[in-house]
Image (spheres, rainbow, N blue to C red):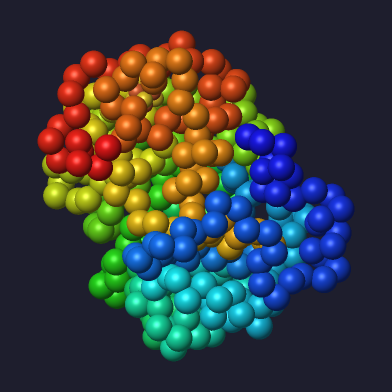
Amino acid sequence: MSEHLARAVAPQPADAAAALAQPEQLPGATLFARPQAARQLYKLDLKLGFRCNNKCVFCVQGDKRDHVRDLTTEQAFARLDHGRQTCDALLLTGGEITVRSDVPEIIAYARKIGFAQVQIQTNGRRLAYLNYCKALIDAGATEFNPSLHGHVPALHDGLVGAKGAFDQCVRGITNLVALQQTVLTQTVITRQNVTYLPQIARLLVKLKVAQVQFAFVHGLGTAALTWNDTVPRYAQVARFLPVALDIVREAGTSVICEAVPFCFLHGREWAAIEPRLHPTTVYDGNLEIGDYDRYRHEAGKLHGPQCARCTWANVCEGPWREYPERFGWDEFAARSDPLPRDMAGSA
Ligand code: SF4
């Protein structure tokens, strides 16, 4: 990552002090501006703040909670107005947005100004309260992304640093399914839960969610500090993830994975979400990443020496750069099989 980008992405103490003292109405610096000629409307990923009632060992934003002040309701509205000029779908995220009291108000405003889709990304704990679920739905939320990282309380609660979080999240998912909502879950693949991915898959199928996503941990924020305990090897992921993917798929439920390069997905390439990701703009603190696809390709992820002779390189983004920077490229093996016809078009 360039020094400039590293400075812009990671909050620095001086910037943080300024942000705490005087949050800006709109994001300040823009990185990877959205192309002027882009005709397609983007999805807006709006981070409302970084406070959270969990302390996940793998949190990619964990270092920001002490440095970046949450947006006020008015600032959130201003950013929605600004984002709506080029975006028609919205992901509200943090931090944990449900620790705020104004989330229904923000959802209602987003719908009022024309966002067709409003996704709520959450640790799922507050969804245990049925009336809260109803308030979000009444305000206009269209999809929910709760996170479940274990199949039993000890595993999930240990990973998120909060006793009782598993029971609350499971109750939250149950509430939303009973209310006939679209529930798209997220499970972060870590060293602690990688061998239990099949059991987690079975639980999520049993809970009748609409889609399961397994995302390889991104070693930034808290995950950078807990790296040795938290980041598994891809070789190990390649043993357990296919079993989990098959369990969900064979149950007739949609299943995807993120940040798992194709050399670890032989036979399960259909699960990789990257070639199908909606173009996205991110508002993160006082930073705007206009074209998040470009950010991933040019700054967030890396290709290694093997990738130069890999037949899948044009559709593969490679791993988050922190992984090979710590572990090297030895596990990665160039593929020589041709791209399937339906993917060759996107290469
Ligand atoms: S060798 Fe590189 S390009 Fe090929 S699948 Fe692996 S990470 Fe992707």
On the picture, is 85 further left or further right than 94? left
Q: Is 34 drawn above or below residue 25 in the view shown?
A: above
| Near-viewer residue (113 or 228) | 113
- Name the residue located 51 percent from the left edge and 72 percent from the top edge: 83
Please state the quadrant of the image where ligand 1 appears: top left
Residue extending furthest top? 330
Image quadrant where residue 279 sits: bottom left
- Name the residue located 18 percent from the left edge and 23 percent from the top edge: 338
Whether residue 15 is visible to the viewer of this picture, yes or no, is yes
On the picture, is 14 further left or further right than 81? right
Whether residue 101 is visible to the viewer of this picture, yes or no, is no
Residue extending furthest bottom? 112
Residue 231: percent from left, percent from top: 54, 28
Residue 300: percent from left, percent from top: 54, 39
For the N terminus, the quadrant is: top right
Residue 342: percent from left, percent from top: 15, 40
- Name the residue located 82 percent from the left edge and 71 percent from the top edge: 22
On the picture, is 112 further left or further right than 342? right
Q: Is 109 drawn above or below residue 27 in the view shown?
A: below
- Name the residue located 35 percent from the left edge and 56 percent from the top edge: 278
| Near-viewer residue (135 or 95) | 95
For the C terminus, the quadrant is: top left
Residue 186: percent from left, percent from top: 40, 50
